[in-house]
Amino acid sequence: MSATHSHPSGVLFISVVILVECKLLGMKTPPDAGVILQGTLDMLILRTLVMGAAHGYTIAEVIEHTSENALEVEQGSLYPALHRLEDRGLVSSQWGLSENNRKAKFYRLTGKGRKELNAATGRWRRMTRAIGLILGESHE
Amino acid sequence: MSFRRFTNRTRKDEDLAEEIDSHLAHAQDANSARGLSSEEARRQAYVRFGNSRSTRERVWRYRSFPWLEDLWRDLRFALRGLGKTPGFTIIAILVIAVGIGVNTAVFSVINAVLLKPLIFPDQDSLVDLMNTSPRGSGGGASVPKFKIWREQTSIFSKVAGFDFGGAGLNLTGGDKPQQVQGVHVTQQYFSLLGAPVIQGRTFTEAEDSPNGGRVVVLSYSLWKSRFGGDSKIVGSTIQLDGQPYLVVGVISKSFVTDTPTDLYLPFQFDLNTQDQAHYFMVAARLKPGITFAQANAQLKLAADEYRRTYGPRAMGPQDGFGVVSLAEAWVGDSRTSLWVLMGAVGFVLLIACANVANLMLVRATGRKRELATRAALGAGRATIVRQLLTESLALALTGGMLGLVLGVVGVRLLLAMAPTYIPHVGENGTAVVPDMHVLLFTLSVSVLTGILFGLAPAISASRPNLVAALNESSSRSGVGFRTGKLRSALVISEMALALILVIGAALLIRTFMKLQAVDPGYDTRNVLTMAMSISGNRFQKTAGVAQLVKDGTDKLTALPGVENAAAACCLPLDRGFGLPFNIVGRPKGDAPFTGGGGYLTVSWNYFNTFKVPLMRGRMFTEQDNGSGPGVVIINEALAKQYWPKGDPLKDRLLIAPGARPAFAEPARQIIGIVGDTRAAALDRKPDPMMYTPIAQMPDGMTALNSRIAPMFWIVRSKVEPHSLANPMAAALLVVSGGLPVAHIRTMEEIVVLNTSRQRFNMLMLTIFGASALLMAAIGIYGLMAYSVQQRSREIGIRMALGAQASHVRNMVIGQGMVLALIGVVIGIAGAFGMTRFLESFLFDVKAWDPLAFIVTPVLLSTVALLAVWVPAQRAVRVDPMSALRFE
């Protein structure tokens, strides 16, 4: 029951993220909604990096696989997000050699990034719980 | 927000490109691992990633200030575009530069005169003390007034009196005597106005008291020019009118007042005097926190006290005291004149804008396809407007910079032409400098101009009909209806604005012509005048002055080329005196005096020298001297006013009745009536005047005159008057015992000076009106020439179908003239509303002067006709064959 529910809402959710991102790069967004929603792709990226340094392709693959392909990362947004995170000092990057023996840029979580991840996860939990309550779902 | 996002953009972009390549490579690897062919693996990786360039653009734009980037791009594009059409660009920039240049020039003067009028520290609390009366108020003070004002310590922290140099002094003791301007001041004058002292000190209280000794403070310019900046000047003595004066200080050159000053002397008032003569001005500084209203209230009390002390004769029941801001008082009525000029140059700028807007419209029409292509490729309307506005701003700013240069040069020309009445411009206009205010003004005017002339064309061009524009075979199609209407509206407003300016100019020209035609009542030709300061001890008594006048006029009359010679206290159109009088035996009721009038002391030959006609009675003779009975000659205006019926020659006048003994006049028999003269100004009705012989003046009056004003020598010559200047000066040097003369001017020069203000206003408005007219003519010419060019095919067809040349010509002329005439009609209506601002500048001309309102529209229409004639002529010459074959 819960699995079938999560699927469509997840896709819906990512597209909202993308929409918000486009708007953020171009124009203004309502600040409150923006912080939470914009943070979502960022949060997923940060979460992925908890397991260790990774390059962009891996990050996208991991998000998609872990979500059982429910979430599809639009790759055009992934890199802007990564660069933004780096500018904010949440991740650091370094060129290195990948498992395929190819040149790749590896991203690593910084201490600041770890803190931000915790905070973002907390916010996310509170919000999904609140939305769940409104939709009448039980999280017990 | 982290600033890192804006740094190293290019390197980061390359980094990202490489990162994306790496991503694609990994995706391709993964796809190959799933067993796809390498080609397919690659394809799917690319498809999956999407547009890598747009990703890079997103990051790039995230790292940029979008508007700044756009602006920079638009600007480069604009400059490139403008560079490709140099003809257009140069004309547009020149038109703007002229428009902004005249504005900058006039604004610089306004800035110096009105916006930062004084240079004294904390000048908001500086006030001028005024005498108020129901007839108006004016400055001027007597010693008792100065005394009572000085006692108002509850409102004033400092009070100082000063004059305007009066008689002038003779600086002797060097190689050659020199007449200098010595301004008399009271002790607090320097501290009141914050004059910096660079050597020594200013006067002490003791030095500014009666018998305070002969002390002098030098101005910087005299110290430099006469004493070579001698650093030991303080403590030495200089010779003034033959007396030694101790130099106590030198004032810095940063201290500038409007009165040219060579040196300062202490007034040394006897504060107990009852002397009611008004011969100086008083300024004061309000105590902190005291408002003008509070000061005026306190001065009302002071006026009551003054009336009690000195009687109603010294101050009438309706009269009082008051203060006005010093800045206000010293700028005076040049204010209106300058704002009118500013309005005029504003109009010129508007016309320039309309002209450039028209040029921009032409250009935009030529670029219709380019703009349509851009719109078709997805440029939004805002983008196109922004692009076009950037172009016009680039033009406006370039024009503005050039205009600034023109303005800085132009303001020198303007000041060179300007009469001396413009205050605060400093010596040779040195105070008028392009400061921050002027720069900001020019910048904002440039930006406003750019928006003004750019916006309408930009908006109209951004509304392209894509299909039509793209399908047109060339840019040589007809003008779109909308732009056609806009351009016509611009030309109409140019004509209307130009007409208003030209009518204004015409009114001022008429005023000036009327002034020139005024009969001043004396003959100004072949009269040479010069001033001599007689402030020395020899001239404190009437006998000494009378002797000098007799010797001088005799000697001057004997000079070859001299017809007549005279001396007088004052010259026509220069400063003068006024005094009250009683008619002996006539009851005067409650009034203190029977009447009053201008008061001139003259040598016996004055009327012959100036050729003032005698109407009745007799002129003065040499026998009307100190030993003869008192006589007076009046003018017709005075006779008419006080003897509407009856015979003045039977009456006697008591001038300045009730004066102290030293000033006491005898009752004077009226012996003659002379013609009226314009003594104060050419545009003022002749005042009632009294003339008395210099040889019959009371001693006190002579002493006062000698102190406050120079004496003037006047000759009527049979030869070119300037050629007499040197012989006269030499003769007078001998008879006066070594006194120099100054201010050598012909009477015609004095007239020119007196009308210089009207001449200046007329010249300015004529120049601006003419440039407006020229610009409007160019505007209408441009529109018609363009329209003929655009319609050459249509005209060719008409002519091929048999249209007469005259018909084609009349059609073009008709269309142009309709616009011109609409503009003229609107302009006439506007002028009716605007010319009332000129009313105070007009003399003997009504603000709706029919002549100006008829001639100007005719002139403008004629110019417009000439401007449309040329393109009409060109239309006639269109060769039908080539026009048809053109495409």
Image: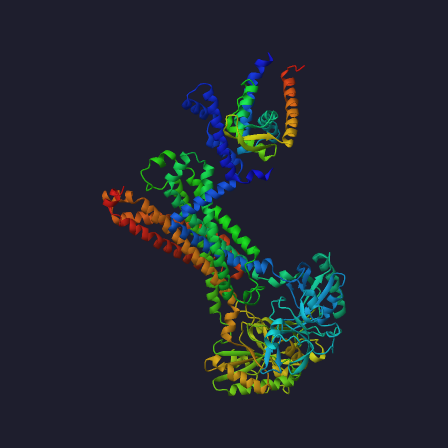
Instruction: Give the quadrant of residue B707.
Output: bottom right
B134 with respect to B41 (left or right): right
Considering every residue shown, the one lying at the far front of the view is A101
Whether residue A24 is situated above or below residue B524 in the rendered picture: above
Q: Quadrant of the C terminus of chain B?
A: top left
Instruction: Give the quadrant of residue B577.
Output: bottom right
Whether residue B290 is situated above or below residue B734 in the rendered picture: above
B255 or B595, nearer to the observer: B255
x and y percentages locating residue B677 in the rendered image: 54, 73
A37 or B296, nearer to the observer: A37
Q: Say whether residue B500 is visible.
A: no
Whether residue B667 is situated above or below residue B459 in the rendered picture: below
Instruction: Give the quadrant of residue B705.
Output: bottom right
B476 or B646, nearer to the observer: B476
Q: Say whether residue B641 is visible.
A: yes
x and y percentages locating residue A13 in the rendered image: 56, 22
x and y percentages locating residue B367 in the rendered image: 38, 42
Colouring scheme applied when the structure was drawn: rainbow
x and y percentages locating residue B136 in the rendered image: 64, 62
